[in-house]
Image (cartoon, grey):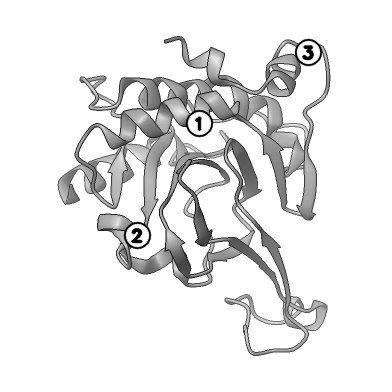
């Protein structure tokens, strides 16, 4: 199956220049947008369910070896190569922000099942920033449903932002939180400044395809994900 056939029609139109990307603003540094058709999300879920899965598993390998999930790997490459450069300006301002490094990082996170409580070593459940300039996280399952595991974007108060940078205080009443409820085929796009976390999974199982990229504005960024891939390959 051609991975491009999984893309939502609005996104396909945006890639051809027929229309601007359709997106919903969540915070100044984050938007949500349709990425996959419902059939596309179901096809990915079927492929991922057919092969043994770790809580976190790398899809994109720099040695271009075989993948247990060829459709997911192909889609991850498509999102990195064609979609991210097209939608980057939705969350990144500046003339050079759409130019991204060739090397990217794509993987799947599983919430529930074998991955319950172990997703990304629990990091996703703590307020954090990603080790990337740009992150696209696409909800791909499961069709059977889930409850919880929503994405929370956390914005510190203006006063806190003027002080020494640090993780926002979740107990501070002035800290704002925006909740994005994941839906099949819908993705969230945010830049590296976005503080976020995932709420507890209450029922069922959810899968997310994550693609990360760096802006091509420093030499070290061009090989950063090569190190990331090597470390996670070792873990799995």
The spot of residue 23 in percent (x, y) is: 78, 38
Give the mark nearest the N terminus, 1 or 3: 3
Residue under numbered circle 1: 41
Tag 2's secondary structure? helix
Comparing labels 1 and 3, the label whose residue is closer to the camera: 1
Comparing labels 3 and 2, the label whose residue is closer to the camera: 2
- For the point 63% across and 49% down, the residue is 191
Q: Nearer the viewer, residue 61 or 208?
A: 208
Tag 3's secondary structure? loop
- Spatial CA distance of label 1 from label 3 is 24 Å
Question: In the displayed structure, does residue 28 sit left or right of residue 118?
Answer: right
The spot of residue 63 in percent (x, y) is: 23, 23
Up the image or down, 163 lies above or below 155; here it is: below
Tag 3 near tag 2, CB within 8 Å = no
Residue under numbered circle 3: 17
Q: Quadrant of residue 195?
A: bottom right
Question: In the displayed structure, does residue 219 sit left or right of residue 8?
Answer: left
**Local crowd at mark 3 within 10 Å, few (<14), some, or many (≥20)?**
few
Give the mark nearest the N terminus, 2 or 1: 1
Comparing labels 2 and 1, the label whose residue is closer to the camera: 1
Q: Which mark is residue 188?
A: none
Tag 1's secondary structure? helix
- Spatial CA distance of label 2 from label 1 is 20 Å
- For the point 46% across and 10% down, the residue is 2
The spot of residue 179 in percent (x, y) is: 68, 64
**Local crowd at mark 1 within 10 Å, few (<14), some, or many (≥20)?**
many
Q: Quadrant of residue 138?
A: top right
- Spatial CA distance of label 3 from label 2 is 37 Å
Residue under numbered circle 2: 119
Question: In the displayed structure, does residue 8 sit left or right of residue 131?
Answer: right
């Amino acid at each position: 199956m051609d991975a491009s056939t999984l893309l939502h029609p609005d996104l396909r139109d945006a890639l051809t220049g027929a229309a601007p990307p359709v997106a919903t603003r969540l915070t100044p540094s984050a938007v949500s947008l349709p990425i996959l058709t419902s059939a596309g999300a179901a096809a990915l879920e079927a492929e991922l369910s057919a092969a043994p899965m770790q809580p976190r598993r790398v899809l994109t390998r720099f040695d271009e070896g075989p993948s247990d999930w060829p459709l997911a790997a192909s889609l991850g490459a498509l999102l990195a190569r064609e979609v991210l450069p097209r939608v980057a300006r939705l969350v990144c301002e500046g003339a050079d922000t759409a130019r991204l490094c060739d090397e990217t990082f794509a993987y799947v996170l599983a919430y529930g099942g074998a991955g319950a409580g172990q997703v990304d070593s629990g990091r996703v459940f703590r307020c954090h920033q990603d080790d990337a300039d740009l992150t696209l996280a696409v909800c791909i399952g499961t069709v059977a449903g889930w409850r919880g595991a929503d994405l929370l974007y956390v914005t510190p108060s203006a006063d806190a932002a003027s002080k020494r940078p640090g993780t926002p205080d979740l107990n501070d009443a002035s800290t704002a939180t925006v909740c994005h409820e994941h839906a099949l085929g819908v993705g969230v796009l945010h830049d590296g400044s976005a503080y976020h976390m995932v709420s507890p999974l209450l029922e069922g199982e959810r899968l997310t395809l994550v693609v990360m990229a760096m802006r091509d504005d420093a030499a070290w960024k061009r090989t950063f994900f090569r190190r990331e891939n090597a470390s996670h390959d070792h873990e799995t």
